[in-house]
Image (cartoon, grey):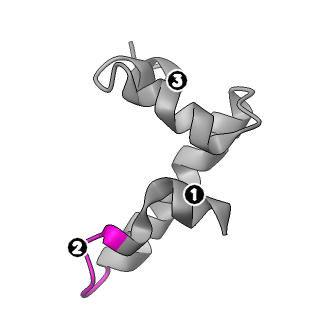
Amino acid sequence: MASSRAARCSGAKIRTGHGPDNMATLRSFAINQLRAAGHPNIAAGLREMSYQPFHRPLDLLGLT
């Protein structure tokens, strides 16, 4: 599954309660936002967002 590899979910430390469900929801939201912005390759989109982590994700969501 490409989305779980791109988000590195196997390395997550949130394993109890609602944590895994919440993280899966956030991961799906992030992937859908990248697709809606025209990123056909999710891993490349995540890399691009990571170059300026405090600006680009907010720009993608229209929160700047």
Q: Which residue is mark 3?
A: 60
Q: Is residue 16 above or below residue 34?
A: below
Circle 2 or circle 3, nearest the eye: 2
Q: Position of residue 18 (x, y in %)?
A: 32, 81
**Pointer 2: residues within 10 angstroms few (<14), some, or many (20+)?**
few
Q: Which residue is mark 1?
A: 28
Q: Which residue is mark 2?
A: 13
Q: Secondary structure at mark 2?
A: loop
Identify the image quadrant of residue 56. top left
Q: Disc number at residue 19? A: none
- Identify the magenta region: 11-18
Closer to the chain start, of discs 2 and 3, is: 2
Q: Residue at x 65, y 61 (%)?
A: 2
Q: Is residue 31 above or below residue 57?
A: below
**Are the residues flagged by discs 1 and 3 in contact, CB closer than 8 Å?**
no
Magenta stretch encompasses residue 51: no
